[in-house]
Image (cartoon, helix red, strand yellow):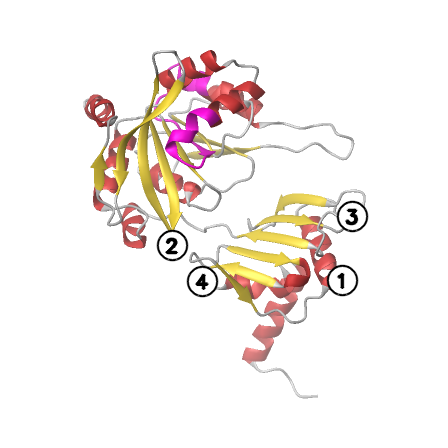
Amino acid sequence: MTGLGNGSALAAGNDARAAQLGAGPLQPALDEPGVTDVLVNGAQGVWVDRGCGLERWPCEHLDEPGARALAVRLAAACGQRLDDACPVVDGRLPDGTRVHAVLPPLAADGTSISLRTLRRRALSVPELVAAGMVGTEGATLLRGLVDGRANVLVSGATGVGKTTLLAAMLSLVPADERIVCIEEAPELNPDHPHVVRLQVRRANVQGAGEIGLDQLVRAAVRMRPDRLVLGECRGPEVRDVLGALNTGHDGGWATVHANAAVDVPARLTALGALAGMDADAIAAQAVSALDAVVHLRRTSGVRRLAEVAVLERDTRGTLTSRLAVTADAAGALVPGPGWDRLARRLEVGSGR
């Protein structure tokens, strides 16, 4: 029998690894440089996102039975169950890849699988500038927010780079400070020597044992954090985060889903309602706790800093967002009506 050459042996080894530990026929797409998302749309095929929108990926051998079998195996690799009794799963592969899968009949066109890659290292600020995410003026402003220990909320839609920007900003934190990150799943990987990462625990099959973000925020406050970071604020934990940032824990960061900076007040109000807070309470807490809202937007496939705003209360006490700067197409910052307030905060921070 003819033996395998080195190249063939390596290819066979990679195929075996992908079949047993990775994403099977989708693994080559995940390994492709620049790919952030791999999507199986049932009978419609496989699509990938390299940062410039979705494009079809050739995967001729992944039929519906194969897609279902792959989804079930991926769920098992995440330590979860996926079958007719539990047809939706969200988890993490051992390498950090995020997995979301839905089986028919909930997925009407066939098994749906969504994979999002985990960035292996945090990008530096110069790399963000080179990628077009921020201009040189925007980079200086963001550095000022970190150096001034401002409490910042990063907003934007899914996939606009909120986590990427946040990791880069945390990499600027002085090495003698302790960062405590709270996340649903570990995504933040800042280039910093002292990072403690906490992640939620889902309920077991009996529905017991769940540890949520709100509980982890309360635990993190007792861990002597110099910087308290919430990967994503999406529920009642907003009460605990704003409470912590109002009690001396400055320099904190969090992310939130929102369509624009002006929509952040409505989003915070809705999240506060989940925690039993009325609009007046969430407005008072947010204005006191948050120094800036940094909003990201994806334009023509490029993820970029679009706006920086400050939170205020109008004459009726309603929480509002006032634009401090807007980034033009070249990344230059155009001052807005909230600039004076943001500039005062940066000046105060620079003197600390």
Mark 1 and mark 4 residues within 8 Å of each other at the beta carbon: no
Which tag, 2 or 1, sits closer to the chain's start? 1
Mark 1 secondary-structure assignment? helix
Magenta-drawn segment: 242-266
The residue that appears at 52% across and 52% down in the rendered structure is 117
Depth-wise, is mark 2 or mark 1 nearer the camera?
2
Depth-wise, is mark 2 or mark 3 nearer the camera?
2
Mark 2 and mark 4 residues within 8 Å of each other at the beta carbon: no
Mark 3 and mark 4 residues within 8 Å of each other at the beta carbon: no
The residue tagged 2 is 300
Confirm whether residue 131 shows in the render.
yes
Left or right of residue 241, residue 308 in this image: left
Which tag, 2 or 4, sits closer to the chain's start? 4
**On residue 83, which mark appears?**
3
Which tag, 3 or 4, sits closer to the chain's start? 4
The residue tagged 4 is 33
Mark 3 secondary-structure assignment? loop
Which tag, 1 or 3, sits closer to the chain's start? 1
Asked if 171 appears above or below 322 in the picture, the reply is: below
The residue tagged 1 is 65
Return the x and y of residue 278 as percentages of the image width and height.
51, 13
Separation of disc 2 and disc 1 at Cα? Answer: 36 Å
Q: Residue flagged by tag 1: what amino acid is it?
A: Pro
Pick whichever, 218 or 131, lies toward us: 131
Return the x and y of residue 230 as percentages of the image width and height.
47, 30
